[in-house]
């Protein structure tokens, strides 16, 4: 049950947004086996003055088209699965909507089963 939050500079089209969400969903299905139709995602756009790409930190040449992706998911996946997820996201978003791999920033936030309520005030995974 991942929850994906995507941040980017303002000005991209609805088709671009859709391609981001679809590419990340496809990558999560392929790399970490999330269930079909497990689609919970938001996109937040920021004005240029409210968006910092940190330039070339750690030798990665980022542009103003940086896409920051934070995925909250259940804890416990091995490092290899996480690395496969990063690669799958980069591959999918490079295909469509054409994001440079240098402009894909991914952060995973792992939480316990009891940290989710998917509605009705119930912790469904406990």
Image: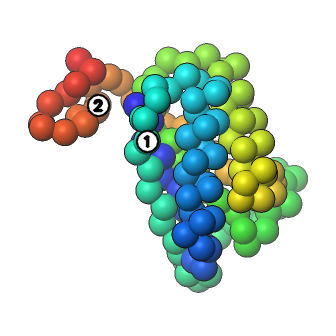
Specify the farthest residue to the left. 121
The quadrant holding residue 64 is bottom right
Name the residue carrying label 1: 39
User: Quick one: 38 or 51, which is closer to the camera?
Assistant: 38
Residue 124 relative to residue 108: left or right: left
Residue 97 percent across, percent down from the top left: 71, 59
Specify the quadrant that holds the C terminus: top left
**Dot 2 or dot 1, earlier in sequence:** 1
Residue 65 percent across, percent down from the top left: 72, 68
The quadrant holding residue 56 is bottom right
CA neighbours of label 2 inside 10 A, class few (<14), some (14 to 19), many (20+) = few
Specify the quadrant that holds the N terminus: top left
Kindly tell me whether residue 51 is visible in this rendering: no
Identify the residue shown where x is 64% and y is 70%: 52
Find residue 115 and name its label. Answer: 2
Q: Secondary structure at mark 1?
A: loop
């Amino acid at each position: 049950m991942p929850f994906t939050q995507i941040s980017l500079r303002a000005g991209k089209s609805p088709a671009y947004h859709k391609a981001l969400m679809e590419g990340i969903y496809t990558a999560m299905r392929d790399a970490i086996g999330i269930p079909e139709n497990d689609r919970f995602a938001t996109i937040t756009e920021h004005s240029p003055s409210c968006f910092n790409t940190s330039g070339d930190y750690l030798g990665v040449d980022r542009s103003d088209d940086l896409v920051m992706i934070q995925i909250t998911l259940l804890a416990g996946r091995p490092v290899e699965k996480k690395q496969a997820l990063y690669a799958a996201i980069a591959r999918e978003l490079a295909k469509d909507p054409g994001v440079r791999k240098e402009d894909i920033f991914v952060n995973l936030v792992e939480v316990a089963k009891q940290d989710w309520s998917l509605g009705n005030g119930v912790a469904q995974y406990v």
